[in-house]
Amino acid sequence: CNPLAETGRSKLQNQRAVLNQQILRAVRMRAGAENLLRATTNNKVREQVLLELSFVNSDLQILKEELEGLNISVEVYQNAEETFSIPLVPLGLKETKDVDFTLPLKDFILEHYSQDSSEYEDEIADLMDLRQACRTPSRDEAGIEMLISYFLQLGYVENRFFPPTRHTGVLFTWYDSFTGVPVCQQNLLLEKASILFNIGALYTQIGTRCNRQTQAGLENAVDAFQKAAGVLSYLKETFTHTPSYDMSPAMLNVLVKMMLAQARECVFEQIGLSGIRNEFFTLVKITQEVAKVGEVYVLVNTAMNQEPVKENIPYSWSKLAQIKSDHYKALAHYFTATILCDHELQAGDDEDQQEKALSQLYDHVPEGLMVLDVLKDKDQRKQLGKAHLRKAIVYHEEALRVCGLCKKLRNIEVLQEVLTAAHKRSLLKYAQQETEDDFLSLIQAPDIVSKTEHKIETIAPQFSKVKVKDFFHKLGPLTVFSAKQRWTAPRTICLHHEAGELGFSLKGGSPVQVYCLDPVCSAASAGLKEGDYIVSVGGMDCKWLGVNEVLEKLKSVGEQPIELEVISCQDTAASLHSKSATYSMGMQKTYSLICLAMDEDKMDQTKKAPLKLPFLSWGTKNRQKAASTLCLPSAVAGSSQNKKKLSPFTLFNTESSLY
């Protein structure tokens, strides 16, 4: 995790960081010009501002194209071994700014937990060091484990220091992976979502790094892309209202499709790694497998060209998906032609089995042809086989044409080599067939029906496999000592034994709680109350001790007086905002459904919900509406409601959050 390592990947990330800063400056200039344009009525000033806006927008477009160039720099992420495969597309890591947790967390420890915050300087430093290391993770399982460790640590930090009723004052800034536009929020959910995105991105980089010339390498690549899809799918379902383009539900849906398509592509390469035997039934299976790869890339390309993803997805990515769909559909027709041209029905062959196998390739056969007749008739076989070769050549030529039109893809040599070799192979196969009847052949090759024996699906992230220890373990059990609970400052009680009796009983786990307190005992006279929690006995911390251990400490002093430190729980039934339940933690509920469940009996029917605010756009559609384009505007928080029964969903008062 050396941030100064001079690797190709680290250089790309450094270039991304520089571009993000340039985009930030340009966006600020555009925001200022837009504000001035709305404020001024002087025509001369308006003309100058409009001219300045045109320059700034041109600059932003150039920066966006440079960022797209980084996103399609796939050669850096591929395996170093010589390979003859179409490159796979990885995701770049999201960049962030430094965050200083020191003052906010120390103030919160002193105010909320009434403890000496200087005792936690090492723990805060460990947290900041871990965050800094997560900006440059190694491209292996150790890097994944470190990112997951920080993600799990954020769960502890959220419960310890981020109460639902107010902000702690820590500002998180993350840059969009595709547009470079920063998002700034005092919300830990932005941090957690961005780390999840980087976990998925790192899995994609691991997948592209695998050696695709070996069986083990391809298996690891398939596994990595499935895990990447699982993490991104978990991010989409868990953080439902993310304020960043690259983490919007529509974009994540496209990215999940793309990762599963790349896993499917690696499965096909795995099947053909040891060579494809020129045998009838083997070729039928290979044909349907490769047709499946082309089919999934058609779906990816279609998804990439839908609004609102189309404006922000790298142009070269959508073109690469189109090229792969055409390339693999061409291979399916080539293999079908090989079946028809190279394998005539022999006397000892099983006609029924071959007819059944060939029928599976077609949804329908050309008019006037029957599958069994095609198998038996040499001329029909040749005509249909040549029709498939012509269609394969058309797809190959289309793939080469699209590749030649895209500047970024045109510079990827191995992509050009693979497409050209496949095209020449189909042309050679076609030239080997007799051509005197070409003008009489009117047969159109039907589409190939896809089928696969290999299931590809998302693999959900296994966070439980990574064991982490709460950095702020000394604060006490999280179920009791959390940001949601309010406590009195510790009180010192001088306890005197009365004929060997304490005058109260203890219950609970850690920490122990006082109950059955005798109101006339010395402890009650000293200020001990029913329900108090004992946090210290004789100067020794006992937040993590059970009943038996605390009793042993109390009895060990004999008849001598002993000092206890106790705390009392304050009323925490503060009203929660009804429009903040946007973090569903895997629950299949939308924002509107959660709000409806909370307020179905008490919501004013005449009150209208605020309009949904649009995401940022590089175009001019939203530019005239937004006062600032640095980050999305805050959602309007609803008024506090009366105390009510809480829903089973986790609630947060995130007034400035769009999660």
Image: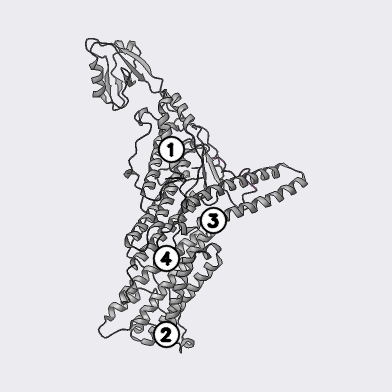
Is residue 445 visible to us here? no
- Label 2 sits on what residue type? Gln
Of residues 554 and 234, the one drawn nearer to the viewer in this rendering = 554
| First-in-chain label (4 vs 1) | 4
Give, as a three-letter code, the residue at label 1.
Asp
Give the mark nearest the N terminus, 2 or 3.
3
Report the Cα–Cα distance between label 3 and label 1: 31 Å
Instruction: Check disc 4 and give the amino acid type.
Output: Ser
**Image coordinates for residue 534, horizontal then vertical, percent:** 32, 21
As drawn, 138 above or below 153: below
**Which residue is the site of mark 1?**
129
Q: Give 295 or 47, whichever is nearer the viewer.
A: 47
Name which of mark 1 and mark 2 comes first in the sequence.
1
Residue 433's label in the rendered image is: 2
Decide which of tag 3 and tag 1 comes sooner along the chain. Answer: 3
SS at circle 4: loop
Measure the alpha-carbon separation of dots 1 and 2. 67 Å
Q: Which mark is residue 1?
A: none
- Which badge, 4 or 3, comes first in the chain's sequence? 3
Numbered label attached to residue 85: 4
In which quadrant of the rendered view does residue 45 lie?
top right
Between marks 4 and 3, how big is the CA–CA gap? Answer: 22 Å
SS at circle 2: loop
